[in-house]
Image (spheres, rainbow, N blue to C red):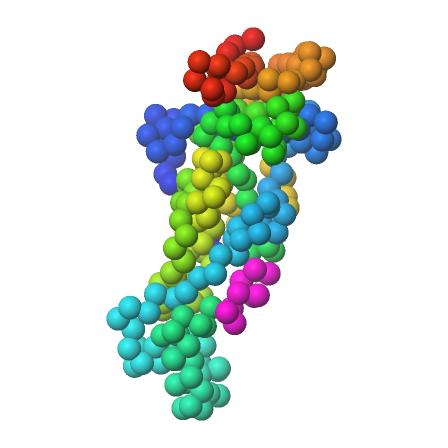
Amino acid sequence: MEDIVIPINNATDFNEHFPETVYKYRDWDNENHKKIITSQELFFPSFESLNDPFDGKLPFMFDNSGIDKKTYKKELRKNNPFEYNNLTKNKIDEKYRNFQSGKDWKSMLKYHIEFVNSIYGVMSLSESATITPMWAHYGNNHSGIAIGFNLFELHKIVQGTISRIKYTEEPVKIPFGNTEDIYSYQNLFFTKSPEWSYEKEIRILKTHFSNKKIQLNKNTISEIVFGMNAEAKNIEEIKSITNKNFENVTFFKVYKNNKKSVLDIKPI
């Protein structure tokens, strides 16, 4: 099973699809968070460690439109002939009824969750460095940093599948008839509830990379954005380490734009 990647011709073509810079909100008091800068390491957790309990575990159904019993039996026989040959006519009829009603996903969900957690590493990034809830939840209550990655350079290193998250309450439907490749259907892993839409997430999914690390190069990080409550000593320490391990990084700090009641950033 291989990742689906968009062609990388040059940064201009890439940036027609995605922003040039994306952000990872981090807490400088967390030793693991520091490693992105201090050790040039980027960790790809499994889905089970993410905050959204439904992330990568969305209930899904097969798309049963236009699939009659004859077509269903043909696909069932093709994809698992041993199981099919041991099924009675009544059992096949029962499986078909469950397929038509959308109930068959329930029997698959436990295996699906175990499979996803063991196979996929996921990197969640944001299109913006000025999202107040993100600073509150992931940036040590505005005292941490938002690390700005050059997404083109990062994706060259990581490869994998990259996409914006789709925020919807609609169930994910899987095309029927390709069960051996069912778990590579990318919309299962790039769909979340609308309540998470404030994150403005762009996600990189990497196969066979659950809970593993990637080594960054000197061009991967282009910005560091300090939270409005970041301490002066942390700012100087982070700037020193960043300039040692990365090239051409620009530093910013968040401030309150009182005229518009939003967060904004300015160079420091």
Residue 254 showing in the rendered view: yes
Q: Nearer the viewer, residue 137 or 174?
A: 137
Query: Quick check: is 110 in the magenta stretch?
Result: yes
**Residue 27 appears left or right of 24:** right
Q: What percent of the width, then of the height, locates residue 20?
A: 42, 25
The rendered magenta stretch, by its main secondary structure, is classed as helix
**Residue 64 appears left or right of 25:** left
Q: What percent of the width, then of the height, locates residue 162?
A: 44, 41
Q: Which residues are magenta?
A: 106-114
Which quadrant: the C terminus? top right
Query: Quick check: is 87 in the magenta stretch?
Result: no
- Compared to 167, does 12 lie above or below? above
- Residue that protrudes farthest toward the top in the picture: 268
Q: Nearer the viewer, residue 252 or 195?
A: 195
Residue 248 showing in the rendered view: no
Q: Look at 29% across and 68% down and name the residue there.
A: 65
Q: What percent of the width, then of the height, locates residue 123?
A: 54, 40
Q: Nearer the viewer, residue 226 or 239?
A: 226
Q: Nearer the viewer, residue 51 or 47?
A: 51
| The quadrant where residue 91 appears | bottom left
Q: Look at 71% across and 31% down and name the residue there.
A: 30
Q: How many marks?
A: 0
**Residue 13 appears left or right of 202:** left
Q: Look at 47% across and 68% down and name the residue there.
A: 105
Q: Look at 48% across and 61% down and name the residue there.
A: 59
Q: What percent of the width, then of the height, locates residue 93?
A: 39, 85
